[in-house]
Image (cartoon, rainbow, N blue to C red):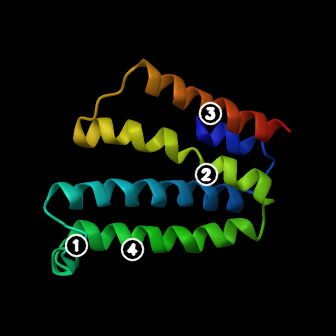
Amino acid sequence: MSVHILAALSLTPQTTFLMLVTVLLNGGAQLLLRAAALRGAEPTRILSLAQSPFFVAGVACYACSVLTWLAVLKRVPLSIATPTIALVYVLVPLAARVVFGDVLNWRIGCGMLLVVAGVTLVARA
């Protein structure tokens, strides 16, 4: 679904790819950090963070997403790029449902639809 929205922006394939990678890296980081938290990583215990492969991988994903985000910002106006990255708010709940068994209800579903509608509006502007 997000590929069609990004295609509507008339972006180059490279820019579209960078935007999708940014969304995936950001969403992946959030999932990895949740996994770290569920497996004992404590923000007040630095050693528990350093010893958690999920925490380290999550931070690495965030770092990489910052780099791809910078590449996107060189090519796309911020007024378009930022709303597009909001697709993370659709990806993460869906992935969390699959990975962690998180509950999705009609309110969350409606919220995700509103995010997609908002990104679509920006893409058509």
Look at label 3 and name its amino acid. Val
Q: Quadrant of the N terminus?
A: top right
Give the mark nearest the N terminus, 2 or 3.
2
Asked if residue 91 lies left or right of residue 38, the reply is right
Q: Residue at x 52, y 22 (%)?
A: 110
Q: Which residue is mark 3?
A: 116
Look at label 1 and name its amino acid. Thr
Disc 4 to disc 2: CB gap under 8 Å = no
10 Å crowding of disc 3: few (<14), some (14-19), many (20+): many
Disc 2 to disc 1: CB gap under 8 Å = no
Q: Position of residue 17 (x, y in %)?
A: 62, 58
Look at label 4 and name its amino acid. Ala
Q: Which residue is mark 4?
A: 60
Circle 4 or circle 1, nearest the eye:
1
Give the mark nearest the N terminus, 4 or 1.
1
User: In 3D space, how far apart are the residues under numbered discs 2 and 1 (Cα atoms)?
Assistant: 30 Å
Q: Which residue is mark 1?
A: 44
Q: Quadrant of the C terminus?
A: top right
10 Å crowding of disc 4: few (<14), some (14-19), many (20+): some
Circle 1 or circle 3, nearest the eye:
1
Give the mark nearest the N terminus, 4 or 2.
4
User: In 3D space, how far apart are the residues under numbered discs 4 and 1 (Cα atoms)?
Assistant: 20 Å
Q: Position of residue 39 (x, y in %)?
A: 14, 59
Q: Quadrant of residue 36?
A: bottom left
10 Å crowding of disc 1: few (<14), some (14-19), many (20+): few
Q: Which residue is nearer to you in this view: 18 or 119? A: 119
Q: Which residue is mark 2?
A: 85
